[in-house]
């Protein structure tokens, strides 16, 4: 073998020499301590801290973060050898980023010593980035070689939520199937709610007392599902008031809701054969201001003393004011809303309350609409399946089987 080749083989790389140098310094320090030599005061022995330089880390990979919107890159690097040779000398690792190899690298994050990964969450999809990692000590720092380019890519699907997608697809399928079944059968069984009898009771009491019925549809317009369900119940209430000859008073928050309510009540009067008794002036626009509307309705309650109050729809802070005022007038009160925060006020102050989805179920059952009925039935079947899934998951978990738990894990 030729002499230049021997010299090349015998020549160690810079990192190896530095590691060997660190090891010799550490061994010398240990021997000095054992021999009771004061290293700090020895004139011939240099300061150990001053003679040690930090070895740079090395970036292993730049990868796009999976299952995201293309706004992050995962960086992984090898820890500096200094960290294992002299624990505590390295404080943290700083991640530096640049949009091009010739640009200035700026810090985008830092992690404590011993950490070899970092996720840069401030990237733009499909834009290249170059990275360096700096090992930072108390008095010095050293930067790794440049790595790049790294790209972040947007994914169409979050694969961590496959289980959720399966259950959503199952629910939608069940709803569509039951809608078709309801259209073909014409009628489909839904549990009869006690509020149906309460409606007849409240209107009958108002008729006996010679007072009117007050109907409040909530604060939302006709594009809200709760308002749509309230319209279906209003049709039943209007039929009973038409039958009994009782006045129905409906102050409205929105003009579109007023128009829809007028048409609904008018059709109800036509169905019972009393179209001449319909009075469009009993259904009127009051105001779109929340508490202005509350003040107006409370004034009606205190002046006219309606014998039956219906609060069916979307309600917010005004729910307690309505319920308390109606309670003081001695009216029968029937309420229903899907706003969870308002349900306690209605439950306490009203005679009957439709809780959450019971409002939709009541609207669907009274309307007879196959789309609404099929939707409610399909959701009920889906809930039953979910309940069985939960029970099965708990039982399997007790036996150490985590398959069902993993299916719906989203993190």
Image (spheres, helix red, strand yellow):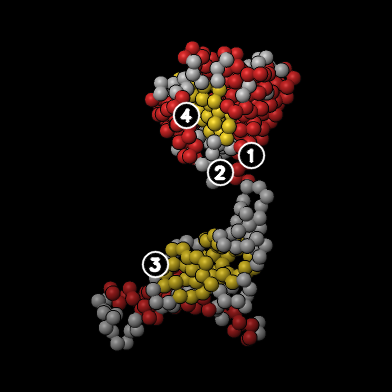
Q: Is residue 363 visible?
A: no
Q: Earlier in the sequence, mark 1 or mark 4?
A: 1
The kind of secondary structure element at disc 3 is loop
Q: Residue at x 50, y 65 (%)?
A: 109
Mark 3–mark 2 contact, CB under 8 Å? no
127 w.r.t. 159: above or below: below
The kind of secondary structure element at disc 2 is loop
Mark 1–mark 2 contact, CB under 8 Å? no
Residue at numbered disc 4: 300
Q: Residue at x 50, y 28 (%)?
A: 311
Q: Disc 3 to disc 2, how far (Cα)?
A: 37 Å
Mark in the foreground, 1 or 3: 1
Which percent across, then down, holds residue 140? 43, 77
The kind of secondary structure element at disc 4 is helix
Q: Disc 2 to disc 4, how far (Cα)?
A: 51 Å
Q: Disc 1 to disc 4, how far (Cα)?
A: 49 Å
Which corner quadrant of the image does residue 237 belong to? top right
Q: Earlier in the sequence, mark 1 or mark 2?
A: 1
Q: Quadrant of the N terminus?
A: bottom right
Mark in the foreground, 1 or 4: 4
Q: Disc 3 to disc 4, how far (Cα)?
A: 79 Å
Which percent across, then down, holds residue 60? 58, 65
Residue 410, numbered circle: 2
16 and 55: which one is in front?
55
Which corner quadrant of the image does residue 392 belong to? top right
Residue at numbered disc 3: 87
Q: Residue at x 26, y 79 (%)?
A: 37
Q: Earlier in the sequence, mark 3 or mark 4?
A: 3
Q: Earlier in the sequence, mark 2 or mark 4?
A: 4
């Amino acid at each position: 073998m030729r002499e230049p080749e021997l010299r090349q083989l015998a020549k160690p790389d810079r990192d190896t020499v530095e590691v060997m140098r660190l090891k010799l310094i550490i061994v010398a320090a240990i021997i000095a301590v054992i021999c009771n030599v004061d290293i700090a005061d020895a004139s011939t022995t240099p300061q150990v801290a001053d003679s040690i330089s930090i070895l740079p880390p090395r970036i292993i990979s730049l990868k796009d973060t999976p299952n995201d919107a293309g706004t992050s890159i995962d960086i992984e690097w090898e820890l500096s050898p200094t960290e294992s040779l002299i624990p505590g000398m390295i404080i943290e690792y700083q991640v530096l980023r640049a949009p091009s190899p010739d640009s200035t690298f700026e810090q985008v994050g830092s992690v404590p010593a011993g950490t070899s990964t970092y996720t840069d969450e401030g990237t733009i999809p499909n834009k290249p980035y170059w990275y360096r990692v700096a090992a930072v000590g108390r008095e010095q720092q050293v930067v790794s070689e440049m790595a790049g380019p790294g790209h972040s890519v947007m994914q169409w699907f979050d694969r961590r939520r496959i289980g959720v997608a399966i259950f959503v697809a199952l629910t939608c399928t069940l709803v569509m199937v039951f809608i078709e079944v309801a259209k073909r059968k014409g009628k489909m069984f839904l549990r009869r709610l006690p509020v149906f009898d309460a409606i007849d009771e409240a209107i009958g009491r108002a008729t006996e007392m010679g007072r009117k019925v007050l109907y409040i549809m909530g604060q939302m317009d006709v594009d809200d599902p709760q308002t749509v369900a309230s319209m279906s119940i209003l049709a039943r209430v209007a039929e009973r008031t038409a039958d009994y000859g009782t006045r129905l008073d409906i102050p409205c928050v929105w003009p579109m809701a007023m128009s829809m309510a007028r048409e609904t009540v008018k059709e109800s009067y036509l169905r019972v054969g009393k179209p001449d008794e319909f009075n469009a002036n009993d259904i009127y626009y009051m105001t779109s201001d929340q508490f202005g509307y509350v003040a107006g309705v409370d004034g009606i309650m205190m002046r006219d003393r309606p014998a039956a109050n219906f609060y069916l729809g979307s309600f917010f802070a005004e729910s307690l004011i309505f319920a308390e005022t109606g309670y003081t007038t001695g009216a029968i009160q029937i309420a229903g809303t899907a706003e969870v925060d308002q349900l306690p006020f209605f439950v306490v102050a009203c005679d009957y309350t439709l809780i959450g989805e019971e409002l939709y179920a009541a609207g669907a059952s009274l309307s007879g609409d196959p789309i609404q009925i099929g939707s409610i039935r399909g959701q009920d079947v889906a809930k039953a399946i979910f309940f069985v899934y939960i029970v099965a998951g708990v039982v399997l978990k007790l036996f150490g089987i985590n398959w069902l738990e993993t299916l719906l894990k989203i993190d």
